[in-house]
C-alpha cells in the first residue's frame, strides 16, 4: 500500500515538472516581449530602445533562457513564484487573494444551481403537462444562452434599471457581508444558469425513470400518500446521477468564470490569468497555471489513493 | 437496494426540512443583500467629498520617467506635478514653479513656489528639481523624456531658482516639463525599482488593492490645496469598457474615463454628461523597405482610396471626424486648417495613381491590425474594403495587441492600421514618423531627411510666422510622400453623473491628461 502511494506521488511530481516546463516554454514561444509591451500602450508613441533594455534588465528578461528556467524552477520548489511584471505584486500573494474569490463565486453558483435545478426538474417530472413543457423549454434556453449575454441582461435589469444590485466589482465579505453577497449575486446567477438547466434536465429524466420502478409501485400500493412516496422513494433515488453531474460541473463552472469575471469586473483568478496572458506577464501566468495544475493533480492523487484503499484490485493495476 | 430504504421516516423528513430551510435562507439573504447593498457611491458623511472614478485598466506599477499609457498617466496626474502643468483649458502654465523667466530662447529661469513639500513631508528643493530633470534627460535611465529634453546642456540651482540652459531654442520644451511622467519626485524615487507614488501633487496615494482599485486622498502639502475640493478619489479598475459603462449607469461610480464609442449615446440618453474631445488620430502606415509601398505614388493612391466618413461611422459610431492630413493643434502658432486637407476620397484618382506606379491590375498585400482593440480592427476592415475597391487585394492580420506590437516592431507587414497621439501638442510630435525609428506604430523603414530637417527647424523657430511657413512646407511634402495616410481622429470621452461639477476634459492630444482637472472638480 505504501509503495502504491509513493508511486502515485512520484508520478504526480513528474507531472508537475512536465507542466512547469510546458508552461515556461509555451510563454517563450508566444510572440511579444513583456518589457516592450509594458511601454507600448498604443497612444503616446513607442518606447526608446534604452527604456526597453532598462526594463528587461529589471525584470530579469536579459538573462539567458536556461538561467531564467532554472531560477523559475527553484523558485517554485521554494514556494516563490516571483513578482508580477506589471504590478510588482508577489504572484503567490495575488493568487492567495484571488483564488478564494473565484471559489466563493463557484460555490455560490453551485448551490444556486442545485437548489433551482432540482426544484425545477422535480416539478417538471411530477406535474407533467404544460409545466413540464415550460421547464424543458427554459432549460434548453438556459443551456444554450451564452453566459455573457445573460450577464448583460441581468446587469441591465437589476443594476441599471432597478438599481437593486451593483453592476460588478468585489466587496470583501469580512468588511461588509451583505455588500459582498449583493455583489456576488448577479455573477453567481449568470454562472449558475447553464448548470442549473443541466441539473434540471438530469433530475427530470431521473425522476421519470425512478417513478416506474417496482419499489415505487409497492410504496403506492401499500397506501402511502403520493407526496410521501415522491419524497422518500422517488426524489432521493433520483439524486444519485445528479450528484455525479455536480462533481463534473464544478470544473466546467471554473472555466466559465473567465467570461463572468470579465462581464462583472470581478477580480478573481480567471481575470488574473486572462490579464496575465494579454500583457505577457510571465510570472503571473506561470503561477496561476501551476496552482490550477497542482490543484487538479493533488485531487487526482487523493482520489486514486482512496480508490486504492477501497478496492485492492486498483493497487495491483 | 437504494440507500434511502435504510433511512427511517424521520431522517428523510429532516433532510427535506433542511433543504427547505437552506432555500428559504438563501432567498431571504439575496433579498436583504439586494436592498442593503444597492450601489451607493461612497458618501462618507457630511462635508466629506469622495469621487468614485472608473479607470480603464489595472495600472502597472509606475516607474519613474517611463510612459506607461493612459491608465498610469491618469494616476500620475493625481499624485504628481512638474515644474510646468496644463491649466483648465490646456495651456501650459507654471506648476511647482511660481514663475518662468526667459531672457533668451535658450535660457529658462524657474522660481519655485515657497515651502514646497512632498507627500512624505520632506521639503521639495531646487536640488530635487535638478536631480529629477537630470535623471529624465539621461537616455541610460530608460526615460522616455530623453528625446524631448535632449537640448538641455546645463541645469543649475541657486536658492529657490533653477536655471536651465538649452543648446538651441525648443518650442516644445515647456510642454515636456508639464507631462505627467515628468514630475518632480524625491531623490529616492529616481530609479527603476521604487514605485513612483510619492509626489507633490494634489492627491496622495493612500491605499492600493491589487486588481480592485486604489484610493488617493487630498494632500495638504499641495501648493494649491485651498482650491482642491475633493477629499478623496476612490479609483476602481474596469478593464472592460462595457463593465465600466455599466458601473457608471448603475451608480457604482460617479465618473469614468475612456468611454467606449458605442456607449456615448447610451450614456447621454441616461441623462449623464459625456465630455469628449477630438483626440488621437488613426492612420495607415507603410512598410517601405520593398514592394509596391516603397513607391510614394502607391502610398498616395492609398491616401486617395480611403472612405474616411465610412471609417468614422464603422469604428466610432460617428464619434470622430475624418482626417485628410496631419493634425496641428489649434493653439499652436503653426496651426493651419489646410494641413488637415491634403487628400480627398477619390477612388478614380487612386486607380490612376496605381496605374502610373505600374500596377494597373493592383496587387496583394497584408494589413496588420489587432483584434484586441475593436476600433482598430473596424478601421482596418474599412481600409481593407476601400483598397480592394481600387484593386489592392488586402488580407487582414489581426492578432492580439502583444503580437501586433512585436510584428510591428519587426516590420512583418505591408501596411498596418494604428492609432496614436502626440505626446505633446507641438507638431514636432511628427518626428517619430520620419526618422526610421523602426517602431510598431510608424512606417517600417521610412525616413525623410527633408521632413526631419523642417520639423527640427520648426522646433527651433521662436518666430510664429516662420513656424507656420515651415509647417506649410511639411504639409506639402507629407501630401506627396505620405509617411502615413491619415484616416480619422477619434473622440476620447470622460463621462460623469450630476454629482460631479467643475471638471472638464482637455483639448486634443491633451485629453489623456484631463485628470489634471480633478484638482478643480467637486462632488455634491
Image (cartoon, coloured by chain):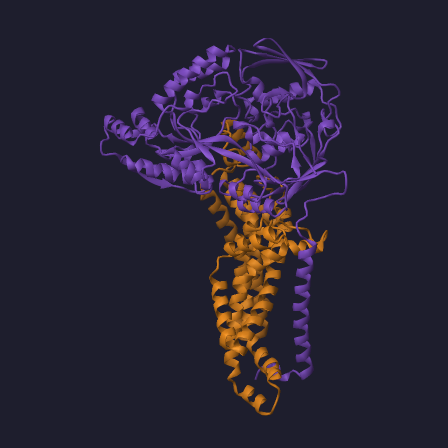
Chain colours: A orange, B purple
Q: Nearer the viewer, residue B501 or B193?
A: B501
Q: Is residue A50 left or right of residue A104?
A: left
- Image-quadrant location for residue B135: top right
**Residue furthest right in the image:** B46
- Where residue B201 appears, x then y in whole percent? 68, 28
- Where residue B184 appears, x then y in whole percent? 65, 24
- Where residue B340 appears, x then y in whole percent? 42, 24
Residue B435 shows in the view: no
In the rendered image, which quarter contains the N terminus of chain B? bottom right
Q: Residue at x 54, y 42 (%)?
A: A281
Q: Nearer the viewer, residue B147 or B215?
A: B215
Q: Residue at x 59, y 85 (%)?
A: A226
Q: Is residue A259 left or right of residue B83?
A: left
In the rendered image, which quarter contains the C terminus of chain B? top right
- Image-quadrant location for residue B214: top right
**Residue furthest bottom in the image:** A222
Q: Is residue A44 above or below residue B24?
A: above
Q: Is residue A66 left or right of residue B398?
A: right
Residue A301 shows in the view: yes
- Where residue A297 appears, x then y in whole percent? 55, 59
Q: Is residue A172 above or below residue B430?
A: below
- Image-quadrant location for residue B9: bottom right
Q: Nearer the viewer, residue B45 or B272?
A: B272
Amino acid at each position: 500500500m505504501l509503495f502504491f502511494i509513493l508511486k502515485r506521488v512520484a508520478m504526480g511530481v513528474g507531472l508537475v515538472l512536465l507542466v512547469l516546463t510546458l508552461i515556461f516554454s509555451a510563454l517563450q514561444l508566444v510572440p511579444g516581449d513583456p518589457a516592450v509591451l509594458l511601454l507600448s500602450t498604443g497612444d503616446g508613441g513607442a518606447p526608446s530602445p534604452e527604456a526597453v533594455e532598462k526594463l528587461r534588465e529589471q525584470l530579469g528578461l536579459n538573462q539567458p533562457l536556461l538561467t531564467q528556467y532554472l531560477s523559475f524552477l527553484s523558485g517554485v520548489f521554494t514556494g516563490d513564484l516571483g513578482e508580477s511584471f506589471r504590478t510588482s505584486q508577489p504572484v503567490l500573494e495575488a493568487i492567495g487573494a484571488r483564488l478564494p474569490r473565484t471559489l466563493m463565486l463557484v460555490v455560490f453558483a453551485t448551490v444556486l444551481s442545485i437548489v433551482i435545478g432540482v426544484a425545477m426538474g422535480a416539478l417538471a417530472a411530477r406535474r407533467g403537462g404544460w409545466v413540464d413543457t415550460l421547464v424543458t423549454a427554459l432549460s434548453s434556453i438556459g443551456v444554450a444562452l451564452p453566459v455573457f449575454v445573460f450577464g448583460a441582461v441581468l446587469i441591465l435589469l437589476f443594476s441599471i434599471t432597478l438599481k437593486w444590485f451593483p453592476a460588478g466589482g468585489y466587496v470583501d465579505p469580512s468588511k461588509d457581508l451583505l455588500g459582498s453577497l449583493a455583489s456576488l449575486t448577479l455573477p453567481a446567477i449568470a454562472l449558475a444558469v447553464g448548470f442549473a438547466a443541466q441539473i434540471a434536465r438530469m433530475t427530470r429524466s431521473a425522476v421519470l425513470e425512478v417513478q416506474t420502478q417496482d419499489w415505487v409501485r409497492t410504496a403506492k400500493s401499500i397506501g402511502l400518500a403520493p407526496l410521501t412516496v415522491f419524497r422518500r422513494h422517488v426524489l432521493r433515488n433520483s439524486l444519485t446521477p445528479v450528484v455525479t453531474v455536480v462533481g463534473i460541473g464544478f470544473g466546467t463552472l471554473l472555466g466559465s468564470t473567465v467570461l463572468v469575471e470579465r462581464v462583472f469586473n470581478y477580480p478573481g483568478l480567471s481575470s488574473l490569468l486572462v490579464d496575465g496572458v494579454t500583457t505577457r506577464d510571465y510570472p503571473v501566468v506561470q503561477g496561476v497555471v501551476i496552482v490550477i495544475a497542482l490543484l487538479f493533480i493533488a485531487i487526482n492523487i487523493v482520489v486514486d489513493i482512496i480508490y486504492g484503499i477501497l478496492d485492492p484490485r486498483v493497487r495491483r493495476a | 437496494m437504494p440507500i434511502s430504504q435504510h433511512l427511517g421516516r424521520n431522517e428523510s423528513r429532516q433532510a427535506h426540512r433542511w433543504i427547505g430551510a437552506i432555500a428559504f435562507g438563501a432567498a431571504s439573504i439575496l433579498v436583504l443583500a439586494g436592498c442593503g447593498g444597492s450601489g451607493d457611491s461612497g458618501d462618507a458623511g457630511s462635508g466629506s467629498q469622495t469621487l468614485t472614478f472608473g479607470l480603464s485598466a489595472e495600472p502597472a506599477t509606475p516607474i519613474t520617467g517611463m510612459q506607461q499609457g493612459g491608465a498610469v498617466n491618469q494616476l500620475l496626474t493625481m499624485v504628481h506635478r512638474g515644474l510646468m502643468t496644463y491649466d483648465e483649458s490646456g495651456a501650459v502654465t507654471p506648476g511647482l514653479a511660481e514663475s518662468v523667466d526667459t531672457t533668451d530662447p535658450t535660457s529658462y529661469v524657474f522660481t519655485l513656489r515657497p515651502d514646497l513639500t512632498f507627500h512624505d513631508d520632506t521639503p521639495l528643493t531646487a536640488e530635487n528639481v535638478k536631480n529629477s530633470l537630470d535623471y529624465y534627460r539621461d537616455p541610460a535611465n530608460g526615460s522616455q523624456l530623453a528625446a524631448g529634453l535632449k537640448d538641455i546642456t546645463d541645469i543649475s540651482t541657486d536658492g529657490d531658482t533653477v536655471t536651465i540652459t538649452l543648446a538651441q531654442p525648443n518650442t516644445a520644451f515647456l510642454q515636456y516639463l508639464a507631462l505627467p511622467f515628468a514630475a518632480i519626485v524625491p531623490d529616492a524615487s529616481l530609479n527603476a525599482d521604487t514605485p513612483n507614488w510619492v509626489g507633490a501633487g494634489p492627491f496622495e496615494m493612500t491605499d492600493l488593492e491589487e486588481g480592485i482599485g486604489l484610493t488617493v486622498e487630498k494632500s495638504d502639502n499641495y501648493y494649491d490645496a485651498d482650491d482642491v475640493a475633493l477629499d478623496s478619489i476612490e479609483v476602481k479598475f474596469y478593464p472592460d469598457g462595457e463593465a465600466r459603462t455599466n458601473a457608471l449607469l448603475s451608480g457604482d461610480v460617479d465618473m469614468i474615463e475612456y468611454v467606449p464609442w458605442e456607449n456615448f449615446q447610451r450614456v447621454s440618453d441616461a441623462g449623464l454628461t459625456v465630455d469628449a474631445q477630438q483626440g488621437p488620430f488613426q492612420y495607415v502606415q507603410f512598410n517601405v523597405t520593398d514592394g509596391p509601398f516603397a513607391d510614394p505614388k502607391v502610398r498616395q493612391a492609398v491616401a486617395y482610396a480611403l472612405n474616411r466618413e465610412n471609417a468614422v461611422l464603422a469604428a466610432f459610431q460617428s464619434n470622430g471626424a475624418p482626417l485628410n492630413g496631419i493634425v496641428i493643434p489649434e493653439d499652436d502658432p503653426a496651426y493651419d486648417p489646410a494641413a488637415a486637407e491634403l487628400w480627398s476620397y477619390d477612388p478614380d484618382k487612386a486607380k490612376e495613381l496605381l496605374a502610373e506606379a505600374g500596377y494597373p491590375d493592383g496587387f496583394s498585400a497584408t494589413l496588420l491590425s489587432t483584434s484586441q482593440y475593436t476600433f482598430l480592427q473596424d478601421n482596418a476592415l474599412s481600409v481593407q474594403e476601400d483598397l480592394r475597391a481600387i484593386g489592392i487585394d488586402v488580407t487582414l492580420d489581426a492578432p492580439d495587441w502583444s503580437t501586433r506590437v512585436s510584428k510591428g516592431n519587426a516590420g512583418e507587414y505591408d501596411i498596418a492600421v494604428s492609432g496614436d497621439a502626440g505626446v505633446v501638442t507641438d507638431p514636432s510630435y511628427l518626428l517619430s514618423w520620419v526618422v526610421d525609428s523602426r517602431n510598431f506604430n510608424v512606417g517600417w523603414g521610412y525616413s525623410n531627411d527633408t521632413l526631419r530637417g523642417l520639423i527640427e527647424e520648426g522646433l527651433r523657430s521662436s518666430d510664429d510666422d516662420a513656424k507656420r511657413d515651415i509647417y506649410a512646407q511639411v504639409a506639402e511634402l507629407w501630401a506627396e510622400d505620405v509617411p502615413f495616410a491619415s484616416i480619422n481622429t477619434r473622440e476620447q470621452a470622460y463621462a460623469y453623473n450630476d454629482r460631479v461639477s467643475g471638471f472638464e476634459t482637455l483639448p486634443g492630444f491633451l485629453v489623456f491628461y484631463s485628470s489634471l482637472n480633478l484638482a478643480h472638480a467637486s462632488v455634491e
